């Protein structure tokens, strides 16, 4: 049964025109396909930012209820809602963390990078032994892009982040529950969750996308069983086939979790 899942995912990967990386961990089985290959992180870099936010809150360096002013001149486009809201706006750190994940808000992400510190976020990545993950610029920083700076990660690194978020002893049960709840509220559900039976499985996911790039990662729970998955794709001529590839893999994962009796 397990080999059937891996073989079916490999067949889907082969049919995709992009460069695909997959990492999967099931209750009693794990595998990856090019899982240590380095990719542009796109919005998956927001998962380490979330982890660092809750780490600092646990240590008392910040409070999730701290209020942050959202300066009009610092707002950026791309994904998110803050760029479109009123001039005089303050939100809590928890609000920013939530917006960063559930609508992938780039302004919220940049404010969090400033507040938490890019070095602290990178230090967390290094502490978690994320081998390919690098935070080298803010979101939508086109000047940095022109200078060749980007953010990077891999499927295996993202899988490690999901496991730490869900079951890692680095975080209290309360912190893990809050982070999982944020991921579970994800509004972008056109990839891994799109063909799952949402009435049967619990899913908490985070997407990423750029022109030619489609990523998604998820924690999937069915009864007492939990699975972790990250799918990263780049070098796509068009993005839509990448979304379809990820959606197919998501359905295979949820169907397997429901049917697997091991």
Image: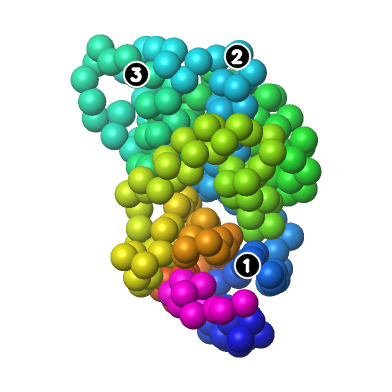
The answer to whether any part of residue 105 appears in the image is: yes
Tell me the magenta residue range.
251-262
Q: Residue at x 55, y 64 (%)?
A: 225
**Residue at disc 3, secondary structure:** strand
The quadrant the C terminus occupies is bottom right
Q: Based on the displayed image, in which of its 4 quarters is residue 20 positioned?
A: bottom right
User: Disc 3 or 2, which lies upstream in sequence?
Assistant: 2
Name the residue carrying label 1: 26
**259 drawn magenta:** yes
Q: Residue at x 36, y 45 (%)?
A: 185
Name the residue carrying label 2: 60
The quadrant the N terminus occupies is bottom right
**Residue at disc 1, secondary structure:** strand
- Render colour scheme: rainbow
Residue 43 higher or lower than 85, as above or below: below
Q: Give the percent coordinates (x, y) of residue 150.
A: 62, 41
Q: Are marks 3 and 1 in contact (CB under 8 Å)?
A: no
User: Disc 2 or 1, which lies upstream in sequence?
Assistant: 1
Q: Residue at x 21, y 20 (%)?
A: 86
Name the residue carrying label 3: 91
**116 drawn magenta:** no
Q: Are marks 2 and 1 in contact (CB under 8 Å)?
A: no
Q: Give the percent coordinates (x, y) of residue 4.
A: 61, 87
Q: Based on the displayed image, in which of its 4 quarters is residue 108 positioned?
A: top left
């Amino acid at each position: 049964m397990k080999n059937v899942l891996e073989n079916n995912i490999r067949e889907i990967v082969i049919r995709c025109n992009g460069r695909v990386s997959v990492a999967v961990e099931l209750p009693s089985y794990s595998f990856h396909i090019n899982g240590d290959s380095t990719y542009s992180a796109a919005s998956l870099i927001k998962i380490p930012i979330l982890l660092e936010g809750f780490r600092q809150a646990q240590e008392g360096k910040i409070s999730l209820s701290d209020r942050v002013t959202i300066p009009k001149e610092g707002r950026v486009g791309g994904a998110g809602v803050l760029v479109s809201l009123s001039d005089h706006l303050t939100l809590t750190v928890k609000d920013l963390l939530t917006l960063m994940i559930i609508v992938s808000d780039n302004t919220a992400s940049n404010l969090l990078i400033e507040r938490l510190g890019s070095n602290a976020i990178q230090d967390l990545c290094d502490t978690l032994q994320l081998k390919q993950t690098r935070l080298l610029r803010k979101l939508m920083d086109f000047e940095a892009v022109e200078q060749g700076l980007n953010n990077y990660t891999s499927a295996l690194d993202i899988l490690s982040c999901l496991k730490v978020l869900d079951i890692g002893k680095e975080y209290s049960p309360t912190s893990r529950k809050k982070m999982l709840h944020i991921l579970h509220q994800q509004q972008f559900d056109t990839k891994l969750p799109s063909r799952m039976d949402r009435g049967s499985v619990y899913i908490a996911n985070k997407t990423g996308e750029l022109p030619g790039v489609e990523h998604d990662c998820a924690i999937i729970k069915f009864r007492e069983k939990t699975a972790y998955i990250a799918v990263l794709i780049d070098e796509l001529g068009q993005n839509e086939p990448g979304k379809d590839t990820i959606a197919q893999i998501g359905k295979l994962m949820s169907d397997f979790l429901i049917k697997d009796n091991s």
